[in-house]
C-alpha cells in the first residue's frame, strides 16, 4: 500500500481535502499536526512558544514516521523544511501538492491566530511562500490547483490522478 501524502502551504486545504478524500474512499486518515498535538498533549503554538521551531520540526519528523501506515496523511506546511521528510514520503507513497495562490491564502488565513509562522509581516510571509512553493513543486508527484474550486472538484481531480497508480 502506498500512503497518499498531501503537502502545501498553510491554508492550502490539506486537512479538509485529506479528510474528504479519505471519507469518500473509506481510507484511514491522519493529520500530522493533530497527531503531534495529541501525542505531546500540547498545542502547536505552545510547542513553538515554549520549545521553539527546531523542537517542533523534530516532533514533526517523528510524527511522519509514526503515521506511515495510514492510507491518507495531511502534513504541516513546513514538512518540506527537512529533506529527510521528503525522501521518506517519496519512498513510502505518493505526494500530492495542493497549490493555492498567495492572495487566496492571505484571504483564508486573514483572521488566523493559530499559526506561529503566519504572524510575520507580509514581506516575510511572501518570502516564506515563494521559498516553500519551489520545494512543494519539486517534490510532488501531482500538483492540484485549488483556487476557485470546491472540495468535491478537488477530490475528483485527485482521484483522476491516482487511478493510474
Ligand atoms: C507550519 C504549518 C502548520 C503547522 C505549524 C508550522 C509551517 O500547519 O505545522 O504551524 O511551517 O508552515 P498547516 O500547514 O496545516 O497550517
Image (spheres, rainbow, N blue to C red):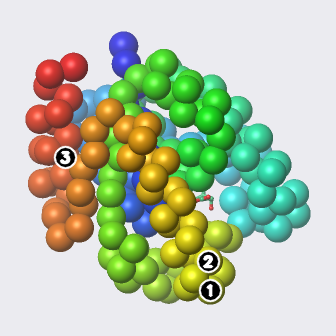
Residue on which the image places disc 1: 121
Residue on which the image places disc 2: 124
Q: Is residue 16 visible?
A: no
Residue 109 placed where, x, y %? Answer: 46, 78
Q: Quadrant of residue 86?
A: top right
Ranked by sequence position, the earlier of labels 3 and 1 is 1
Q: Nearer the viewer, residue 149 or 38?
A: 149
Q: Secondary structure at mark 3?
A: helix
Residue 108 placed where, x, y %? Answer: 39, 77
- The answer to the question of whether label 2 and label 1 lie on touching residues, with beta carbons closer than 8 A, is yes
> In whole angstroms, how far apart are the C-alphas of marks 2 and 1?
6 Å
Residue occupying image coordinates x 11% and y 35%: 160
Q: Secondary structure at mark 1?
A: loop
Q: Residue furthest right?
A: 50
Ligand 1 located in image quadrant: bottom right
Ranked by sequence position, the earlier of labels 3 and 2 is 2
Circle nearer the viewer, 3 or 2: 2
Residue on which the image places disc 3: 155
Amino acid at each position: 500500500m502506498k500512503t497518499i501524502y498531501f503537502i502545501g502551504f498553510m491554508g492550502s486545504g490539506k486537512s479538509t481535502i485529506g479528510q474528504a478524500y479519505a471519507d469518500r474512499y473509506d481510507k484511514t486518515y491522519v493529520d500530522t499536526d493533530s497527531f503531534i498535538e495529541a501525542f505531546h498533549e500540547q498545542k502547536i503554538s505552545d510547542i513553538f512558544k515554549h520549545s521553539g521551531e527546531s523542537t517542533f520540526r523534530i516532533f514533526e519528523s517523528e510524527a511522519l514516521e509514526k503515521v506511515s501506515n495510514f492510507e491518507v496523511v495531511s502534513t504541516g506546511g513546513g514538512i518540506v523544511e527537512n529533506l529527510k521528510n521528503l525522501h521518506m514520503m517519496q519512498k513510502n507513497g505518493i505526494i500530492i501538492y495542493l497549490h493555492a495562490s498567495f492572495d487566496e491564502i492571505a484571504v483564508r488565513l486573514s483572521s488566523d491566530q493559530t499559526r506561529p509562522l503566519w504572524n510575520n509581516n507580509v514581506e516575510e510571509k511572501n518570502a516564506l511562500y515563494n521559498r516553500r512553493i519551489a520545494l512543494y513543486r519539486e517534490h510532488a508527484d501531482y500538483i492540484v490547483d485549488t483556487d476557485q474550486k470546491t472540495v468535491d472538484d478537488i477530490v475528483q481531480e485527485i482521484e483522476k490522478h491516482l487511478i493510474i497508480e
